[in-house]
Image: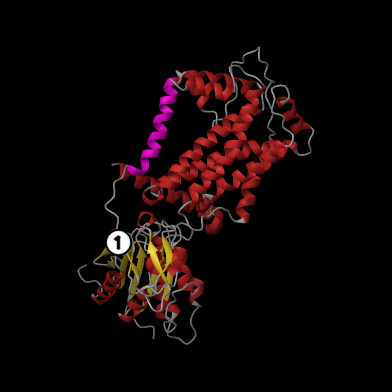
Amino acid sequence: MYQKTLEKLQELTIACEKLLNKIFSQQYNPFYYHGAVPNLFMWTLFITGLLLFAYFQPTLDSAYISVNYISSKIPFGNVIRGLHRYAADAMMIAVLIHAVRVYFTDRYRKYRWIAWYSGVALLLCMLVIGITGYILVWDERSYMIVLMMTDALKQIPLVGHGLAKIFINGHVITHYTMAMSFFFHVGISFLLLYLLWLHYLRISRPVTDVPLGLGLLLVSSIMLPAAVLPVASGKPAVLTQIPHEFPVDWFYLWVFPMFSSMPAMIVWTALFIAVAILLALPFLIVDEGKSPAAVSLDNCVGCTLCAKDCPYEAIYMVPRTDHPKFKQLAIVIDSRCAECGLCVGACAFKAIDLPQKHSKEIIAKIGDVLKEPAGAGV
Amino acid sequence: MADDKKKKIIGIVCERSVDLKKHIKNNHLAEKDNVAVVEMICSGMIQPIMIEEGFKQGADGVFVMGCQIGDCHFREGNKWCQDRLLGLRPPNIKKTIDKNKIRGFWLAKCDYKKFLDKVNKFEEDLKNLPQPEAPKPAAANV
């Protein structure tokens, strides 16, 4: 049942892909760069963030003023600020498409579980970065976010009060609250880079860049709203006036409407369960046992072709001493092997093969199939 | 020599590209019984010897089919296969084999119609092949 649904969903993605192929052509189809597109937006965020960083003052008194100074006084400051906001939304959309596509096309489990797990961590970090980013503006919305988040954190048993204390950096909202939000916003952004390294682990030649044409198109697609619909702060936050509502960014701040409509503990439990489900997903489908590629000692000449072609960094070359002529031997790391057979296709010496689907059998089958009279048994 | 005798064609096909399960009878296409099909895990597993074996066993043409370039389930299989057909990546196909008799199709799961068109075109090309000037260089079609 579960697998039937997945198959249907896969057909859906392929249909979308066909449509996009017609619009963008195969070379520029963003679906084929679904991992690189979030990356493009991430670098946009880093660069625009760096420019904002130069003028931003992380204190309660001057945060709002400095953000407005960026918007109104710095040449193109408005556009940079808009880019920073819209790139964040675009990145979330791109990440969700990436995750959904990977899930629908069955590319998230088995030898890919590290990428899935680091992806979940990346997504959570993005949410924290997004929420703390909205605090930095220090308008009414920021104040509400701080108040609601502190309340919600305090509801968590045992660690709640500690977390709330870390979040506002003390017992009450002070300048240090702003400094802490700034630290989270920037610090966790750099944590993204480490997590991305984990994300790329075991992938040879990850596709991290989109083609120039597509990149320009995507950047202009956020440049346009940044220029036409400039981002503006709300009313400045006044600590003595507690605001009651604020405009919600549905990509990053969706948790706050949940906090306001139900007890915080229910929201935290729901989030916890959601993350647990995400982490359990790769192991929901049980596969038959592994049969990774095997190297034949007699045939391997150490040409490195299979190691170069392996898309999962599962084949390593090691020096060998047991052979008079050949100095290297290919070694397969079983846990990384995807059993895809790319190494078999790369080998001209019949030295590496999948035990379950041996190339000899396929060659024999090619012979058999051709010997059968055409149309026999139809 | 464009005779009426049907050309024997064999396809070495990635099981994740065009879904042929419903269309295969006894290892041949139900609609075109001169086209034999062998399914594999990934087009990247196709060795040049397999293509050579097809010709050795009397095929008039061999086509390879994988998923759309850029969308290999195993990331790079169809790219490597395409490069091998083009002669850009070792191991190479024997030089004695006429590259006009080899085709690469790169199609998604739902592209059965396109697939049939391409096979028909390939068959047509094979029939016209023995004329001295080949219709087009093989590389252009891969």
| Type of amino acid at the residue the image marks with label 1 | His
* Picture residue at 53% right of the left edge, 43% below the top: A94
Residue in front for this viewpoint, A90 or A167: A167
| Label 1 element class | helix
User: Looking at the picture, does residue A106 appear above or below residue A160?
Assistant: below
Q: In screen coordinates, is A171 left or right of A311?
A: right
Question: Is there any visible trace of residue B118 in the rendered image?
Answer: yes
Q: Quadrant of residue B29?
A: bottom left
* Quadrant showing the N terminus of chain B: bottom left
Q: Quadrant of residue A332?
A: bottom left
Q: Position of residue A133 (x, y in %)?
A: 61, 31
**Other-residue count near label 1 (Cα within 10 Å), few / some / many at <14 / 14–19 / ≥20:** some
* Picture residue at 71% right of the left edge, 26% below the top: A63
Q: In screen coordinates, is B95 left or right of A172?
A: left
Q: Position of residue A173 (x, y in %)?
A: 62, 18
Is residue A280 located in the magenta-colored stretch of the structure? yes
Q: Majority secondary structure of the magenta segment?
A: helix
**Colour treatment of the image:** secondary structure
Q: Position of residue B75 (x, y in %)?
A: 45, 57
* Residues in magenta, as a range: A265-283
Residue in front for this viewpoint, B32 or A247: A247
Residue in front for this viewpoint, A18 or A292: A292
Residue in front for this viewpoint, A220 or B114: A220
Question: Is there any visible trace of residue A5 in the rendered image?
Answer: no
Q: Position of residue A347 (x, y in %)?
A: 39, 71
Residue picked out by circle 1:
B23
